[in-house]
Amino acid sequence: MLYRTMPKTDEELSILGFGCMRLPVIDNDPSKIDEDKAIALVRDSIDRGVNYIDTAYPYHGTGMGTAGESEPFVARALKDGYREKVKLATKLPSWLIQSREDMHKYLNEQLQRLETDCIDYYLVHALNKGLWETLAKLGITDFLDQAIADGRIRHAGFSFHDNSVELFKEIVDAYDWTFCQIQYNYIDENNQAGREGLEYAAGKGLGLVIMEPLRGGSLAAHLPEEAVEAFGKADDSRTPADWALRWIWNHSEVSVVLSGMNAMEQVEENCRVASEAQVDSMTDTEIATVDEVRDILSRKVKVGCTGCGYCMPCPAGVNIPQNFTYLNDFHRFDNPATKQTAKYVYNMLLSAEEKSSNCVECGQCEEHCPQGIKIRDMLKEVTETLSN
């Protein structure tokens, strides 16, 4: 396992972090973590050298407004001496904050849920323009100063979920952050904070933690045949996930890449790549190959959903991420049989309540979407494209 020093600290962090947003679950219920399997994955990754574990207040819950099961699970997974081996990261649920007192309330609750006295890396979660304006007025920076001073957190950061690079720079400049977390992969090089934000934050001395390196797994599996062929021509020993991760670790600005590993073979592969990937190690030919695949995928992907689930639960019961998965599957492949399969699974595997046609257009989902997707419009397209 390779390590990089987090700027502003003397801490060596594994370049691969374990993200606990997509743990294995029971009966496709995100609130029911398959605990035995998930603990084995987390501990095996730590045994292999991973020392950064990331979770958040709503992960593996029933919606953004309630506490999920991920934080308590992490507390249990890190028993038996594993807590001392890692740096623990979680996030203030910024959308629930209505007062300075709320900031303290949720942090204290998270400390209890995680069964720890101190959170190593604490992020203000999912910042966008509206949330940042609210939190700034409520004194978020003073709160972070106090939490660091009294020892409840060690390092303060934020995760960014907006499409304005200028807003990102404003937030970077507003406080003496240790680090920030952004979505970055070879598809999103110019989306959200993008490369410009990556370089700006690094230039200000912040560490960079990367989320969605595989875009919810879509860059690891089910790629169009021509994309797989492009990778294979360059190096047939590498998987698409290997290519995607190496591309990110090629950047010197990156401190940690989070991966939501939910199978042992993913842990094994990701740890292997993290033991080999070096800064500036990709050749011009390899970078050109990634550029070629980016162009192929950009033409194919209909909706940029990563499956993060921030839009859920839908008050009407629509399974928004799954609807978008089927729509992307329909458009990503040119094979008529694959298109027919996408239509079949949409019509047969989703209940009437879960289908896009059940959307009542309340707009609640769009308030939380990190990708800024016009979800109501896209659900109409799902219905038009996939309904029998």
Image (cartoon, helix red, strand yellow):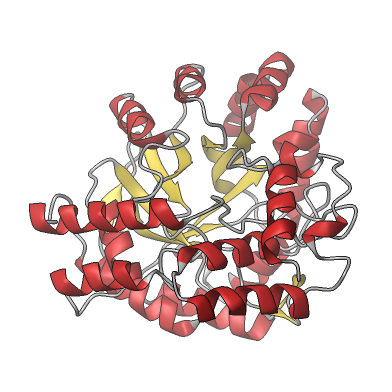
The quadrant holding residue 112 is: bottom right
Q: Measuring from the top left, give residue 353's x and y in whole percent.
A: 88, 65
Residue 21 seen in render: no
| Drawn side of residue 28 relative to residue 259, left or right | right
| Drawn side of residue 146 relative to residue 157, left or right | right
Q: Measuring from the top left, give residue 328's x and y in whole percent.
A: 55, 61
225 is higher (above) or lower (below) than 157: below
| Drawn side of residue 376 relative to residue 186, left or right | right
Q: Residue at x 69, y 27 (%)?
A: 131
The quadrant holding residue 98 is: top right
182 is higher (above) or lower (below) than 334: above
Q: Residue at x 33, y 24 (%)?
A: 204
Q: Measuring from the top left, give residue 362's x and y in whole percent.
A: 87, 41
Q: Quadrant of the C terminus?
A: bottom right
Q: Farthest top residue?
A: 137
Q: Residue at x 82, y 65 (%)?
A: 354
Foreground of the two, 16 or 236: 236
Residue 10 seen in render: yes
Foreground of the two, 11 or 332: 332
56 is higher (above) or lower (below) than 179: below
Q: Measuring from the top left, give residue 123's x and y in whole percent.
A: 57, 40
Q: Residue at x 82, y 24 (%)?
A: 99
